[in-house]
């Protein structure tokens, strides 16, 4: 810190907060209410310094570059006491020729990080009025209503959000390297696919080469370990940056497919630059060959919105994704693996990289390529209006170019999107719609603010996409009905964010009434489970209304909203652990009903991405995996709702309509077995229907009249079981209850368990003579994931669950079981 004479060890990559934590200067930021006492950090300037030695041979290189891959955010960089560079964008990659500043022996690199709060306040004052930034938690930061996040090109969520804390970081968040050059270097290669079909792929390899010495060079491109080049050319390079395009083709190419549709084949291309038969640079990249289109075509209902990959229409199944931590250096490769493997295991094929976070690290995109996860990639703008001065716009241009060039070779990138929710929030041209932002400004200010928006998102960014990656579509804002049409809940084109359930306090049944062409956001909250709660709280915090849990609930009314919904639908337990359990089931049921409603409307609706997959800190949120990577009930439910074959129940005023949905590659002749049973498993009625499971659309197979059901049976004592059968094979199965959970007459189940160890897993066999609803298993102090959880155990059925051992012996008494039956019986 400036003015402080003490130097402390630091890590790179890292940030001020984690370095202070490592040096025991601050408490754990996420623990209890510690966030509040750490707001002083972002109001100070900090200096990082290091020395490095160079010998005289190293200094003989013609050019030495300092490659700064990520600086957060405002810096002055000194090398041997000379100011060499100033930066102001967390998202940019800065390179500086430092040859003239270096000496033999010790060299001193010093980076001064200027407070983003100080800079933000200065820019706010210069503008003369504030800009909307509804999720900037300025009051927690001690700034009252002064919203400064919009002025700084750094991760917006660092200033707070309605699911995360305010930690405005500074630091070296990506590596720094010295690059020694003599002749030339490959700066970038874009493998642009100009033609792709089953017979041939034609690829233009577009090179950017920095030539320090002009002359004749040779470029070779190899596939894998093959010795013969698939393309080669000799080029005369001029001093400076040279652009060279080398076309080549691949016969009968193997294609890259999204998860669940096909293999994720990738070609290993190796590009070599040589001079006088000496190889001077080599770049190896894995490239997936695929075509991808955003299909927006007029139809009888409006205009379609879906993705077509390799000529196949894809129903997108997935979630919105946020950064995994407020302190980005703490996100390990293992954590990236965990979350993306979870997405794959949950039958997802798309994630939306939301615009209030970061352009993720390369490893994230590499894993998405490996696992077949398509990406809706936002630019980093969300829920705010932004400045439009020349310096800001030029900064954004360079940011966009840097990140498009870095990411465009990844097969997983499906769409570039300008921002999150700004168009729908401002709602230009209609004073009666939007988030009431416009009303706070004069007509002249409104004109300026919208002009800045229009310039950035409808001119600058699409022009940059056209220049640097025209193979992918650009969408100006999410949600949006069309380029110049605002999204509405009744829109029949574009994408939709539906928040009537939760923010609007509407019933879950409204998920069936508000279905867009592509559902890119919707959600419902829950808290983490007890195992995770214990990690950031003390026992006296274990109350929905405790100061600590309210401090970890950023949706304001969130905890009370959970309880309001719970009182309508479920018993409300007095026990805190049981309250967490019921809250997670309720969240899971809500999102499951939305997912299946969207799938039941295929092909009118062709995508469903719930909010949100993950968390950046521990607390209440809309996530399906908590900060510690534990699966909530929602993740287990999403896995089943996103299965290749799924059953959807679609209740209306009089009937329950039953749909079957398939993401398989072909149609199947199947039987649908509908059985009404009581909770002891007695069969009350049965119907078998022969039908076709179609891969291009959802099929309605039956309608059950609920009034007729209630005349014949007590709705609170029965359930409907549906099985989809192909011969003797069970393709899918699900059950439907005719009454809300708190009204169900469920008795206390006697669940028998048998346990055994097989290799590294504990195997648990469960049976019950009565229906056991939402069986929840856990082991204290063990965060391994059960193969299934929160499931309904049908009477007489055997359920086998596995649990990876936690490096400890697990005995039968260590496995705890909780059911909704137990809570219902306690509440009577």
Image (tube, rainbow, N blue to C red):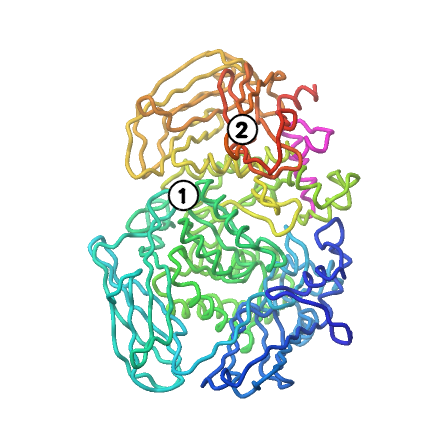
Residue 693 in the image, given as x and y percentages of width and height: 32, 31
Residue at 24% from the left image edge and 66% from the top image edge: 228
Q: Quadrant of the C terminus?
A: top right
**Displayed quadrant of residue 22:** bottom right
Residue at 49% from the left image edge and 73% from the top image edge: 398
Decide: is 616 above or below 344: below
**Displayed quadrant of residue 385:** bottom right
- Compared across the picture, whether 496 is left or right of 696 comes to right
Q: Quadrant of the N terminus?
A: bottom right
Q: Which residue is mark 1?
A: 605
Mark 1 Cα-neighbour bin, 10 Å: few <14, some 14–19, many ≥20: many
In the image, 391 versus 644, the foreground residue is 644
Disc with the residue nearer the chain's start (2 vs 1): 1
Q: Nearer the viewer, mark 2 or mark 1?
A: 2
Q: Residue furthest right?
A: 540
In the image, 714 versus 788, the foreground residue is 788
Q: Which residue is mark 2?
A: 757
For mark 1, give the secondary structure.
Answer: loop
For mark 2, give the secondary structure.
Answer: strand
**Displayed quadrant of residue 216:** bottom left
- Compared across the picture, whether 476 is left or right of 443 comes to left
Overall secondary structure of the magenta section: helix
Q: Which mark is residue 406?
A: none
In the image, 176 versus 548, the foreground residue is 176
In the image, 742 versus 539, the foreground residue is 539
> What segment is highlighted magenta in the picture?
556-580
Whether the magenta-drawn stretch holds residue 105 is answered as: no
Decide: is 587 above or below 393: above
Whether the magenta-drawn stretch holds residue 577 is answered as: yes
Residue 306 in the image, given as x and y percentages of width and height: 37, 49
Residue at 51% from the left image edge and 38% from the top image edge: 511
Mark 2 Cα-neighbour bin, 10 Å: few <14, some 14–19, many ≥20: some
């Amino acid at each position: 810190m400036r003015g402080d004479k003490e130097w402390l060890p630091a890590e790179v990559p890292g940030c001020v907060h984690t370095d202070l934590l490592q040096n025991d200067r601050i408490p754990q930021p996420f623990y209890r209410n510690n966030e509040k006492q750490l707001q002083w950090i972002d109001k100070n300037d900090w200096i990082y310094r290091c020395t490095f030695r160079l010998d005289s041979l190293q200094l003989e290189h013609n050019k030495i570059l300092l490659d700064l891959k990520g600086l957060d955010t405002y810096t002055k960089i000194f090398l041997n006491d000379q100011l060499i560079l100033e930066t102001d964008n967390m998202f940019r990659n800065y390179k500086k020729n430092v040859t003239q500043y270096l000496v033999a022996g010790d060299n001193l690199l010093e980076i001064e990080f200027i407070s983003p709060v100080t800079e933000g306040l200065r820019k706010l004052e210069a503008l003369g009025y504030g800009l909307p930034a509804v999720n900037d938690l300025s009051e927690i930061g001690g700034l009252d209503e002064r919203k400064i996040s919009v002025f700084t090109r750094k991760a917006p969520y660092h200033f707070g959000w309605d699911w995360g804390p305010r930690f405005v970081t500074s630091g070296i968040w990506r590596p720094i390297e010295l690059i020694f050059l003599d002749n030339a270097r490959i700066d970038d290669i874009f493998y642009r696919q100009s033609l792709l079909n089953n017979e041939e792929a034609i690829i233009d390899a577009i090179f950017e080469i920095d030539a320090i010495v002009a002359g004749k060079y040779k470029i070779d491109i190899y596939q894998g370990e093959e010795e013969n080049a698939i393309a080669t050319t000799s080029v005369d390079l001029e001093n400076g940056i040279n652009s060279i395009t080398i076309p080549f083709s691949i016969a009968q190419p193997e294609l890259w497919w999204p998860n669940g549709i096909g293999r994720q084949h990738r070609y290993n291309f190796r590009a070599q630059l040589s001079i006088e038969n000496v190889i001077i640079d080599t770049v190896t990249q894995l490239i997936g060959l695929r075509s991808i289109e955003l299909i927006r075509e007029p139809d009888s209902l409006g205009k379609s919105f879906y993705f077509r990959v390799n000529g196949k229409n894809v129903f997108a199944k997935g979630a919105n994704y946020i950064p995994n931590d407020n302190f980005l250096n703490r996100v390990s490769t293992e954590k990236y693996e965990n979350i993306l493997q979870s997405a794959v295991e949950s039958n997802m094929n798309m994630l939306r990289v939301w615009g209030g976070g970061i352009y993720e690290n390369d490893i994230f995109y590499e894993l998405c390529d490996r696992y077949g996860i398509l990406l809706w990639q936002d630019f980093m703008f969300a829920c705010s209006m932004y400045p439009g001065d020349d310096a800001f716009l030029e900064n954004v241009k360079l940011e966009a170019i840097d990140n498009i060039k870095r990411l465009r070779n990844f097969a997983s990138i499906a769409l570039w999107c300008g921002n999150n929710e700004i168009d729908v929030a401002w709602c230009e041209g209609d004073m009666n719609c939007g988030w009431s932002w416009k009303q706070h400004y004069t007509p002249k200010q409104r004109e300026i603010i919208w002009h800045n928006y229009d310039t950035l998102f409808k001119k600058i960014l699409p022009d940059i996409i056209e220049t640097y990656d025209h193979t992918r579509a650009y969408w100006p804002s999410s949600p949006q009905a069309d380029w110049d049409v605002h999204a509405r809940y009744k829109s029949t084109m574009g994408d939709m964010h539906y928040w009537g359930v939760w923010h609007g306090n509407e019933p879950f049944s409204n998920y069936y009434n508000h279905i867009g062409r592509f559902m890119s956001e919707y959600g419902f909250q829950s808290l983490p489970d007890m195992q995770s709660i214990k990690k950031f709280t003390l026992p006296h915090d274990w109350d929905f209304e405790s100061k600590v849990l309210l401090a970890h609930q950023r949706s304001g009314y969130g905890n009370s909203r959970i309880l309001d919904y719970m009182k309508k639908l479920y018993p409300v337990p007095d026990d805190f652990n049981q309250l967490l359990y019921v809250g997670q089931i309720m969240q899971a049921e809500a999102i499951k009903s939305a997912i299946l409603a969207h799938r039941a409307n295929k092909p009118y609706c062709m995508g469903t991405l719930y909010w949100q997959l993950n968390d950046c800190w521990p607390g209440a949120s809309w996530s399906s995996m908590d900060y510690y990577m534990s699966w909530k009930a929602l993740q287990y439910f999403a896995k089943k709702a996103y299965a290749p074959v799924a059953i959807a129940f679609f209740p209306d005023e009089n009937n329950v309509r039953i749909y079957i949905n398939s993401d398989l590659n072909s149609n199947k002749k199947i039987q649908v077995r509908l059985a009404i049973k009581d909770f002891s498993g007695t069969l009350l009625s049965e119907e078998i229907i022969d039908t076709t499971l179609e891969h291009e659309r959802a099929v309605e197979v039956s309608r059950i009249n609920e009034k007729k059901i209630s005349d014949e049976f007590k709705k609170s004592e029965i359930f409907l079981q549906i099985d989809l059968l192909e011969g003797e094979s069970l393709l899918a199965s699900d059950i439907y209850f005719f009454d809300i959970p708190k009204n169900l007459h469920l008795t206390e189940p006697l669940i028998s368990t048998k346990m055994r160890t097989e290799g590294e897993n504990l195997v648990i066999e469960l049976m019950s003579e009565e229906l056991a609803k939402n069986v929840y298993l856990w082991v204290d102090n063990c965060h391994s994931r059960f193969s299934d959880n929160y499931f309904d155990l049908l009477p007489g059925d055997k359920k086998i669950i596995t649990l990876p051992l936690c490096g400890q012996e697990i005995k039968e008494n260590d496995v705890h079981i909780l059911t909704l039956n137990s809570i219902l019986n306690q509440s009577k």
